[in-house]
Every structure is written in structure tokens, then in C-alpha cells.
Image: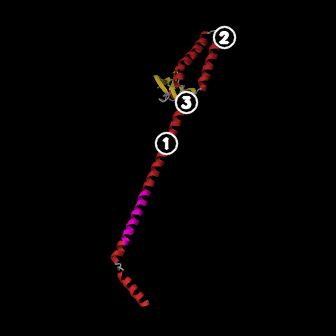
Amino acid sequence: MSEEKKNIDQENDSTEVPVTKAAKKGRKSVASKKKDKTEEKIHDLGVKLEEMNDKYLRLFSEFDNFRKRTQKEKLELFKTASEDVIAALLPVLDDFERAIKSAEENGVEDDYTEGIELIYNKLKTTLNQKGLERMDVMGTEFDTDFHEAITNIPAPTPDMKGKVVDVIENGYLLNDKVIRFARVVVGN
């Protein structure tokens, strides 16, 4: 039996199809193609991930900038929200100053003048608490960012050339923003 077994084994071996080099290459090329496709997909997904991450970071920074800008605008709005009301009250402040000056020049009763000064000081203090500042421009260099020249006159002294010689109407700042330019006379 052992001889028969050998013969059967030999027959089985002879029925096996010999694997050629081309077949081996074909198997390898199919496997390498699958591997290449997988690597390509992984690479493509990595590129997409980087793109999405970049888009996310840009969107996040844009939103953060928007949030900061909006917050800054709100703060500015709160600072200058009362600008219209305060600007409307400036002529009243000017009228009080003229009334006090007129009362002093005409010798009006002290009680009357004192009452006007009390009201004027209370109004001025309230407006100052809201951020109103009076510009002190007398004798300063003429600056179009803060002054409006009404006229030019010959300078009383050579050092007053180009400087404010007289103030016709006071200028005011509200939280460092000009709400009324000072109307001035400039020496030339």
C-alpha cells in the first residue's frame, strides 16, 4: 500500500497547475493595486481633514473677531448714546454763562446771580459726569480737528501768530469725541 500511496501522491502532485512567474506578478499587482488605492484614499482623507480643520479655524477666528468688534461697538454706543441730548443742552449751558456774565456786568442782585450760578453749576456737573468736557483753547495752536476759525485778525504779539486769540463759542468733547467745535478767532 505504501507504493500505491506514493503513486497517488505523485498523480496529485502532477495534477497541480504549476504557478508561473506571470501569475505570481498578477497576484502581487492586484494586491499592490488594492494597497495603492487604500493609501490614496487615506491620503485624500488626510488632505480633506486638513482643509476642514483650516476652514474651521478660519471660521472660528472670524466669529471671534466679529464678537470683539460687536462688543467694542456696543461700548462705543453706550459712551455716546446721550450725544444728541447733551449737544441739545449745550446752547442752554451757553445761555447760563451769558446770563451770569451779564448779571455781573449790570450789577444785578447777588441773590439772583447766585441762583443762576447754582443752576448752572448743577447742570455743568451733571453733564461732566456723563463725560462732557469743555475744551480749553485760548492761546493754543489752531487745530482744525478741534477748532472752527470764524475770522483772522492781526496777532497782538508775534508769538500769538497761528494761535487762538479769542473764543466766540466754547467747544466740547464727549468721552474724547468732539461734539461741538470751538469757534475761535485766529491771530495771523
Q: Which residues are magenta?
A: 27-45
Categorize mark 1 by other alpha carbons within 10 Å: few (<14), some (14-19), many (20+). Answer: few
Q: Residue at x 64, y 10 (%)?
A: 112
- Colouring convention used in this rendered image of the protein: secondary structure
Tags 3 and 1 in contact by the CB under 8 Å rule?
no
Q: Which mark is residue 78?
A: 3
Residue position for label 1: 63
Under tag 1, what secondary structure? helix
Instruction: Give the quarter of the image for residue 127.
Output: top right
- Count of marks, rendered view: 3
Tags 2 and 3 in contact by the CB under 8 Å rule?
no
Q: Mark 2 to mark 3: distance in Å?
A: 39 Å
Q: Residue at x 60, y 14 (%)?
A: 100
Quick check: is 37 in the magenta stretch?
Answer: yes
Give the percent coordinates (x, y) of residue 182: 51, 24
Instruction: Give the quarter of the image for residue 89.
Output: top right
Residue 175 versus residue 58: which sits nearer the camera? 58
Under tag 2, what secondary structure? helix
* Relative to 97, residue 27 above or below: below
In this picture, residue 10 sits left or right of residue 188: left
Q: Mark 1 to mark 2: distance in Å?
A: 62 Å
In this picture, residue 117 sits left or right of residue 51: right
- Per the picture, the main secondary structure of the magenta-coloured stretch is helix
Q: Which mark is residue 123?
A: none
> Tag 1 or tag 3, which sits nearer the N-term?
1
